Amino acid sequence: MAAEDAGAVVVTGEEIGRLFRHESGRAVASLIRRFGDFDLAEETVQDAFEVALERWPREGVPDNPGAWITTVAANKALDRLRRAATLREKTALLEQEAMRAEPEPPPGDQLGEFPDDRLRLIFTCCHPALAPEARIALTLRTLGGLTTPQIARAFLTSESAMAQRLVRAKRKIRDAGIAYEVPGADRMPERLPSVLATLYLIFNEGYLASHSDTDNLIRSELCVEAIRLARVVHSLMPREPEVEGLLALMLIQDSRRDARMADGEMVLLEDQDRSLWDREEIEEGLALVESAASRTRVPGPYLLQAAIAAEHARAPTAADTDWPRIAHLYGWLAAVQPSPVVELNRAVAIAMAEGPERGLELIDRLEGLDSYLHLHAARADLLRRAGEPERARRAYERALELVSNPVERTFIERRISELASP
């Protein structure tokens, strides 16, 4: 139904873009299931976006924007296939199919076991024939709504290298004839780590948007979608500690959403108004941490991160935070999942427990993070706390060169200004 028929409100191009980012992942998932082609799905959804930019400001948003996007994109896909002479036979079949409702999965098809179409395709993308990073990157690009530059930043690599990785992954699926199918229960665990990593990175992009056209720190639609999908995975695997850990981590982090900005500016954890934290999300997250911990003697990375988040959530004030405990948990996490980013977080926790000089000593030993914004921001903050304003200013200026989110940029500029004040 057109928007004018339903009395819908006409929207701006910026609002259309935000709504499209929220809905496009489901549309891509539906088109990949239908046509079996990643590139065709992505390109025709982009075509649908261009149509929406033309029509929605004039006609308003459809009653069901997700269905509208899928329908327009599917028609675009059929048009492309019609124009391909070598695919005439396949086009005829697709045209017949387009006149009918989507058929039920045949007997024995395990698609019916999954309650969510988008999650079905995430499991499909995470096929073991693909390299682990390629699985995650492809899923983020296709279903998570993340751009190639955003994914590249998440993997601490260049945009060109990530683009090549995505092309290779799609080619591998095509050339190897990898079926678009959902694994059986016996094969689901082998794909679970990639699925959880994908949901984790989708949530992270929402929690701290690498880029925002609306001067916002958070893309709440990505946080909400990642939590929703994590809940679906938890309903399928309720006794998996890492599933519980990831859901707990998301809930506890998301509980602070309303306190992370004030008057349009970013508020650090230590300065947040904790009365604004969502206690229901915190209580659910803490219960999941306890449940997961009772099921395993060797916690995985998501459960450990959830335990760290739980320490912050339990502290009534910033001064009550158990930083020695958090530093210990980061040490455990570094042993389970070694990475310079984990070591950076551990160094900050140690600095909060033992003093900024100790943290700076550890940060200065790290390698491979010179292009990582948060290394320089953390170093600048510790230098500021240590009473070295000039060195802190230089570190903030390096962070400013790397920042892309306008809210973070404003925060860093304010820090630099404060250091320059007498």
Image (cartoon, helix red, strand yellow):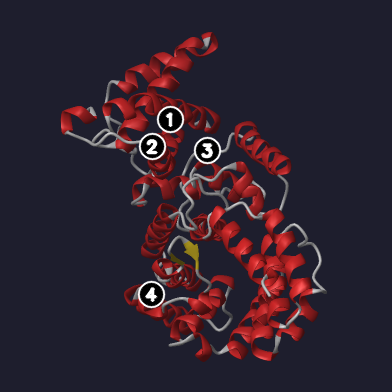
393 with respect to 267 (left or right): right
Pointer 2: what residue? 16
Residue in the picture at 59% in, 89% down: 325
* Type of the residue with mark 4: Trp
Residue in the picture at 52% in, 41% down: 142
Residue in the picture at 55% in, 57% down: 201
Q: Nearer the viewer, mark 1 or mark 4?
A: 4
The residue nearer to you, when weighing 364 against 47, is: 364
Q: Specify which label sits upstream in the sequence, 2 or 3.
A: 2
* Type of the residue with mark 3: Ala
* Type of the residue with mark 1: Phe
Pointer 4: what residue? 277
Q: Specify which label sits upstream in the sequence, 1 or 4.
A: 1
Residue 175, percent from left and from top: 64, 31
Pointer 1: what residue? 49
Q: Is residue 121 above or below residue 283?
A: above
Q: Is residue 179 above or below residue 353?
A: above
Q: How far separated are the C-alphas under marks 3 and 1?
A: 28 Å
Pointer 3: what residue? 179
| Mark 1 neighbour class, 10 Å CA radius: few under 14, some 14 to 19, many 20 or more | many
Quick check: marks 3 and 1 in contact, CB under 8 Å? no
Q: Is residue 313 above or below residue 324?
A: above
Local SS, label 4:
loop
Local SS, label 2:
helix
Quick check: marks 4 and 2 in contact, CB under 8 Å? no
Residue 15, percent from left and from top: 38, 40
The residue nearer to you, when weighing 95 against 109, is: 95
